[in-house]
Image: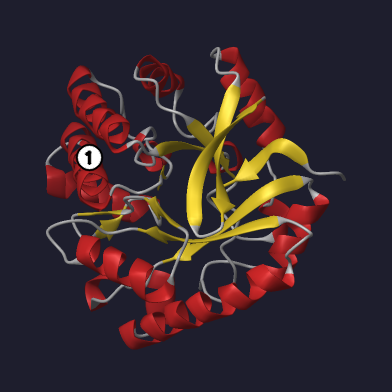
Amino acid sequence: MSPQPWKCSLHGGHSKDYCEHAYSTLRDIIEAAISAGYDTFGITEHCARIEDKYVFVGEQRKGITVQQLVDTFDAYAADSMEIVQEYSGRINLLRGFEIEIMPPDRYPEMTAHWRKQHGFDYVVGSVHWVYEQCVDEDEEYFKLMIDQAGSLDELCCEYYRLLADMVQRVKPEVVGHFDLVRLFGQKFGNVDTPQVIRYAEQAMQAVAEAGSILDLNTAGIRKGVGHPYPAPLYIEMAKHMDISFCFGDDSHSVGQVGFGLDEAREYLLKHGITSITTLVKHGDELVKEVRPL
């Protein structure tokens, strides 16, 4: 399939080479992106986690240590430079990484260090952890997080507070799956109460002030949310604030590469959004480029 200019994913390319919960090799995922007609594909493996309390349950079961996570991330940083060169002329590849953990820990400072040390093109800023639990790993753990917060409402507010803090401190080029707390949260009640929306609006304002691009993430479709992340009310909120969108297939396997992209395009068009924003390298400079849908 010939590349189409609007087919650009800035959040995806997680592979089993560097991610315990992924299923395909990075080269196989890139080949799938070429076959899917992607013009630009950002590979954004998860950053290292440097504290035992942030080791995923699946990693714990396999005996994976923090040092192994750091070594794997370093290997990704080195290997990805070679892979970008290998695929030059076949697809526009960008080297990025996705962050997951925010204050009060040291991760904003570590993000800047990793980016400079390894020469990454960009960062996808996400929040996966609240109250030292991962919000999208396990429904039972999510229920424990509600109990810890005191209510679903308070948990969602804390999620968006952390998201705003992350954006303000890191200023990532891309903000990942804005309302990820919706995945399990909507099974336990209303995740869009007036109080939650106020905190979400503050996070969205931080996105606007940072000049970040919002990830229109198709994992929401394949995980049963009913639409991509974010939900329609946040699409309209972002539109009102003149925040731009990019696509992210959040792929962890070949079968997920390009999944839901046509639906995501129609989703944006339905809300009156007629373009996406991607990132393009001009020499050593990375610039935004708007492309019509």
Q: Is the N terminus in the top left, top right, bottom left or bottom right quadrant?
A: top right
Instruction: Point out residue 223 in the picture as x, y percentages from the top left corner.
Output: 55, 43
Instruction: Point out residue 33 in the picture as x, y percentages from the top left corner.
Output: 73, 54
55 above or below 62? above
State the SS at label 1: helix
Instruction: Point out residue 256 in the picture as x, y percentages from the top left corner.
Output: 67, 51
Most distant residue in the right direction:
1
Residue occupied by mark 1: 164
Instruction: Determine if residue 265 is in view.
Output: yes
Residue appearing at x 22%, y 40% in the figure: 164
Answer left or right for 136 relative to 200.
right
Residue 176 occupies quadrant: top left
The residue nearer to you, when weighing 38 against 59, is 38
How many numbered discs, if any? Answer: 1
Please state which amino acid type lies under the numbered disc 1: Ala
Residue 93 occupies quadrant: bottom right
Answer left or right for 78 relative to 74.
right
Answer left or right for 174 relative to 29.
left
Residue appearing at x 61%, y 17% in the figure: 269
Q: Which color mode does the image show?
A: secondary structure
